[in-house]
Image (spheres, rainbow, N blue to C red):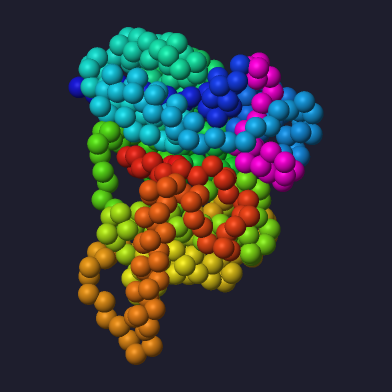
Amino acid sequence: MADIILHSDLNCFYASVEMNENPALKGKAVAVCGSTEDRHGIVLTASYPAKRMGVKTGSANWQARQACPGLICVPPRYELYIKYSKIVRRIYAEYTDAIEPFGMDENWLSLPYGGGDVEGVGQQIAEEIRQRVREETGLTVSIGVSFSKVFAKLGSDLKKPDAVTVISKENFREKIWPLPVSELLYVGPATTRKLMKMNIPTIGALANCAPELLQRWLGVNGLMLWRFANGDDHAPVMPRDFVAPIKSVGHGTTCVCDLDSEYAVWRVLYELAQDVQHRLRKHELCARGVQITVKDNDLDYRQYQTPLPFPTQSPLDLAAAGFDLFRQRYTWHKPVRALTIRGINLVPIHQPLQLDLFHDAERRERRRALDNCVDDLRSRFGYGMICAASLMGHNDLAQDKCELVVMPGMMYR
């Protein structure tokens, strides 16, 4: 018997937490911004009054203030958001063990009981969860109920805030197919432009397109999107204790302001590489390659990768290779909004290493010992206890550092 799938989305999460902590902000136009003073800082999330005035997530501070002159900007407090996220997940855990995070504020839940009755049992459980979240945390949540993960996520977007939407096998054509194709999971700006050129503006148009044409135009992703649009999605919700095999280790961020210089890009890559080193060390792995993902301020992204001459955990080695890739490949057609650096082609740390005549093994070992010492100090006393001199005064990333939280298929601070 099919499971019932829920997708929960905490409404305006960061802003809602701030209003919950400071009741004087409730009902006002509030935005959580990566940099509250810098006019080029980015809006991370906004309250509904702010959104009604035209404030958009991802817009620059000056654009947000232009749309809403009375906007109240507050800095992010990630430790606090993680605290609330964990409280909400504890509520979910009373209903199922299958809880798959999709960011700090979104989760899929799979209910193995109810016989797939999304309009009966599914809606009843979703309403109960919605009410409990509001009463026990002060936050509101929108929940989609469906027979698939993709449609459940779409359902959670249809009614906001504080609502439940049911997408069944009987009504998905009516509720889902008229939506813009860009609303479908994994359809980003670049894919949307391709589909629009093919005269496929809606999810319904995608569903009714010949799958062989989509495969020709978009490759295997075309077939996947066609199946999603037709409700043919059988991906399971991962259990809470699921640990995927580690094929790569990476970390990324949306910067508090758009980056417009190579020096700013280097500092972000170097700081992100510190987190990558921490996780590689934790899992006793080294990387034989580096991959970077660069997202510009139009939200288009590009991905580049290169092999490394020897396996490494060193944040300096990883960042240097990633920065070389960036300088060689990125054309600066747009400022940079977000960066990710990833260690790939992983090997065990104790795997024998073939050295060459030009390899300074002693220097490499000294650097490894230094990196490990820094990592130990941060683990014991906090991330901000020590940092590289080149990163002092670095304000392209949020300053509220905290331990990484790793979840099934998801990692966030």
In the rendered image of this protein, does residue 1 appear above or below residue 275? above
Q: Quadrant of the C terminus?
A: top left
For the point 51% across and 57% down, which residue is it? Answer: 387
Residue 339, given in percent of the width and then of the height, sits at 54, 54
Residue 277 figure quarter: bottom left
Q: Quadrant of the N terminus?
A: top left
Residue 357, given in percent of the width and then of the height, sits at 34, 90
In the rendered image of this protein, does residue 369 appear above or below residue 16? below
Q: Going by the image, does 408 lie left or right of 102?
A: left
For the point 58% across and 36% down, which residue is it? Answer: 76
Q: Nearer the viewer, residue 42 or 284?
A: 284
Residue 270 on the magenta segment:
no
Inspect this view and state whether residue 408 appears.
Answer: yes
Residue 288 figure quarter: bottom left
Q: Nearer the viewer, residue 381 or 116?
A: 381
Residue 391, given in percent of the width and then of the height, sits at 57, 59
Q: How many marks?
A: 0
For the point 53% across and 27% down, which residue is it? Answer: 13
- The part of the chain drawn in magenta is 24-44
For the point 58% across and 49% down, which residue is it? Answer: 397
In the rendered image of this protein, does residue 176 appear above or below residue 406? above
Question: Which is the main secondary structure of the residues drawn in magenta?
Answer: loop
Q: Nearer the viewer, residue 149 or 252?
A: 252
Q: Going by the image, does 96 lie left or right of 86?
A: left
Q: Nearer the viewer, residue 405 or 152?
A: 405
